[in-house]
Image (tube, grey):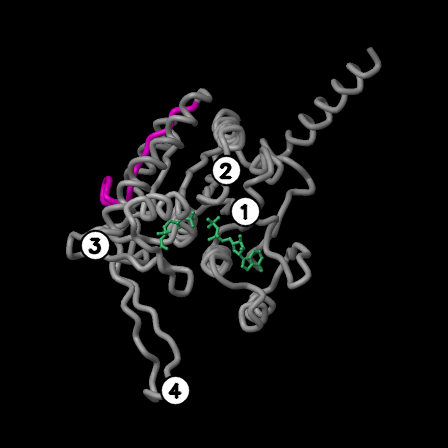
């Protein structure tokens, strides 16, 4: 009996703690990037979907941008194709682009849409081609080549960066009470498909939608220092130091860069949180402590 009262008091505490956040964030847009590494198992995925539906139910406007890097890697492996990454970007030839489009636009996108709908939400899946949502331009990378006396340009194929976003279709869905679920595929001026890192799409989406928060779910507790301590409240100069000394590398690079860019362009805050923790989105949005790494605009 005592235990039940205690449990009930805990529930009441959590609910009252959530109240000011519900009030503050009503009508605000929350862009949530769901990384492929955070889509670990069915329980976690359902927890994520429930969090998104809860946000919508209490009046926020969640917009999901998803990745699916490991899932693309799995299918490439099955067809006997090796994945290669340069500066965190997947080298994407024509055949790889076909796989990216099948996995992101097909399998992963529809899986998330279905999960959200099974939890009582109304989700609609899009790629950047729908409603001309994401216009891409080819990304060119460079690397230092002292022997050439100039930076060497590296061609990584059908990899894009965001040229522009037309939010028309997203606005229409949000106002119709749907939850948009966006796969990071853009279309170039040449009419071709481009594979875009999902963090880059999420960051720009948050900017153009004037989002309150950009929440990036990944498979680490946040941005960590060399000792594994989660860092938070970082300045741009501290982030640049951590990039220069190699503490931030690989997949964390685009994440942190787009988080910084987003807050410098008006998004109130960006959060890098652990998608392997059940209900991590709710813990971030509805509790005083929040979780993970917080990056705020000045
Ligand atoms: N300083 C850092 N702190 C945390 N993770 C880091 C850091 N530097 C590099 N990483 C790597 O970045 C990974 C997250 O990026 P990525 O694998 O692209 O995930 P996602 O699929 O969620 O986008 C982490 O699993 C970790 O291996
Ligand atoms: C150019 C590039 O690298 N695109 C990514 C797109 C998917 C993605 O970003 O997925 P995660 O968020 O799960 O890493 C890729 O092909 O893996």
Q: Callout 1: helix, strand or loop?
A: loop
Q: For disc 2, does the CB lie below 8 Å from ligand 1?
A: no
Q: Position of residue 38 (x, y in %)?
A: 50, 42
At 69% from the left edge and 28% from the top edge, which residue is drawn? 14
* Residue behind mark 2: 40
Q: Callout 4: helix, strand or loop?
A: helix
- Residue 282 visible? The answer is yes
Q: Callout 3: helix, strand or loop?
A: helix
Q: Are marks 2 and 1 in contact (CB under 8 Å)?
A: yes
Tell me the CA gap for discs 4 and 3: 31 Å
Q: Nearer the viewer, residue 256 or 99?
A: 99
Of the image marks 1 and 3, the number of the one nearer the N terminus: 3
Q: Is residue 128 magenta?
A: yes
Q: Position of residue 115 (x, y in %)?
A: 42, 27
User: Quick check: 121 above or below 60?
Assistant: above
Quadrant location of the C terminus in the rendered image = bottom right
Per the rendered image, the range of residues in magenta is 121-133
Q: Nearer the viewer, residue 243 or 148?
A: 148
Instruction: Answer with left or right where residue 49 lies relative to residue 4.
Output: left
User: What number of labels is visible?
Assistant: 4
* Residue behind mark 4: 146
At 37% from the left edge and 53% from the top edge, which residue is drawn? 197
Q: Residues within 10 Å of mark 4 (few under 14, many from 20)?
A: few
* Residue behind mark 1: 219
Instruction: Answer with left or right where residue 232 lies relative to residue 202.
Output: right
Quadrant location of the N terminus in the rendered image = top right
């Amino acid at each position: 009996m005592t235990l039940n009262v205690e449990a009930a008091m805990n529930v009441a505490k959590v609910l009252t703690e959530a109240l000011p956040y519900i009030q503050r964030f009503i009508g605000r847009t929350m862009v949530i990037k769901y990384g492929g590494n955070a889509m670990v198992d069915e329980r976690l995925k359902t927890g994520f979907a429930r969090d998104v539906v809860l946000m919508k139910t209490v009046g926020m406007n969640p917009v999901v941008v998803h990745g699916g890097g490991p899932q693309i890697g799995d299918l490439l492996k099955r067809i006997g194709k090796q994945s290669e990454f340069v500066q965190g970007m997947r080298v994407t030839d024509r055949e790889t682009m076909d796989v990216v489009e099948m996995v992101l636009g097909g399998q992963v996108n529809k899986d998330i849409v279905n999960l959200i709908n099974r939890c009582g939400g109304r989700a609609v899946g899009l790629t950047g081609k729908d409603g001309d949502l994401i216009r891409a331009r080819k990304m060119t990378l460079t690397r230092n080549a002292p022997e050439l006396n100039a930076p060497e340009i590296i061609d990584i194929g059908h990899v894009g960066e965001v040229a522009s976003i037309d939010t028309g279709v997203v606005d229409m869905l949000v106002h119709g009470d749907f939850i948009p679920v966006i796969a990071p595929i853009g279309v170039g001026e040449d009419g071709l498909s481009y594979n875009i890192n999902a963090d880059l799409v999420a960051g720009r989406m948050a900017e153009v939608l004037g989002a309150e928060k950009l929440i990036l779910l990944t498979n680490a507790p946040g941005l960590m220092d060399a000792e594994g301590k989660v860092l938070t409240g970082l300045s741009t100069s501290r982030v640049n130091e951590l990039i220069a000394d190699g503490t931030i590398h690989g997949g964390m690079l685009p994440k942190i860069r787009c988080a910084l860019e987003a807050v410098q362009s008006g998004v109130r805050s960006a959060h890098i949180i652990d998608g392997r923790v059940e209900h991590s989105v709710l813990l971030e949005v509805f509790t005083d402590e929040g979780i993970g790494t917080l990056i705020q605009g000045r």
